[in-house]
Amino acid sequence: MKVVFTKHALKKFSDFKVFEIIVTKSQVRKIVINPKYNLPDNGNKISAAAFNEKQNLRVVYKEEKGVIIVITFYIYRKGRYGEY
């Protein structure tokens, strides 16, 4: 399935680099395709999986005509949303 990124999502990659956190498009794609957690969110979908030992990476996206559109993504502490 094709995965595309919004301008906002693309900017997030460079925003994280400022703090020396490297998130790759490949990591985001893997989480969307094979998540550990899935949640609905106001017509969008949220998928999450481990980013490292202490943090998860959440990806907010929607599907349109067989294309996954990544809206944004963020890193959070494991357990924050009941996800470990």
Image: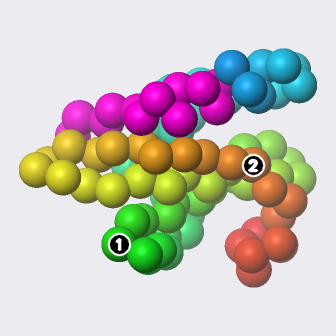
Q: Is residue 30 visible?
A: no
Q: Nearer the viewer, residue 56 or 66?
A: 66
CB contact under 8 Å: marks 2 and 1: no
Q: In percent of the image, x 39 and y 66: which residue is there?
A: 44
Residue 11 inside the magenta-drawn segment: yes
Q: In percent of the image, x 80 and y 43: which residue is there?
A: 52
- The residue identified by callout 2 is 75
Q: If you read the primary sequence from the N terminus, does the residue marked by circle 2 or circle 1 appear first?
A: 1
Residue type at mark 2 is: Ile
- The residue identified by callout 1 is 43
Residue 63 as seen in the image, left or right of residue 21: left
Q: Quadrant of residue 79?
A: bottom right
- Mark 2 lies on a secondary structure that is strand
Q: Is residue 40 above or below residue 21?
A: below
Residue 81 inside the magenta-drawn segment: no
Residue type at mark 1 is: Gly
Picture coordinates of residue 61, whole percent (x, y): 41, 53
Q: Quadrant of residue 43?
A: bottom left
- Mark 1 lies on a secondary structure that is loop
Mark identifier at residue 29: none
Span highlighted in magenta in the image: 1-13
Q: In percent of the image, x 46 and y 29: which residue is there?
A: 7
Q: Residue furthest bottom?
A: 82
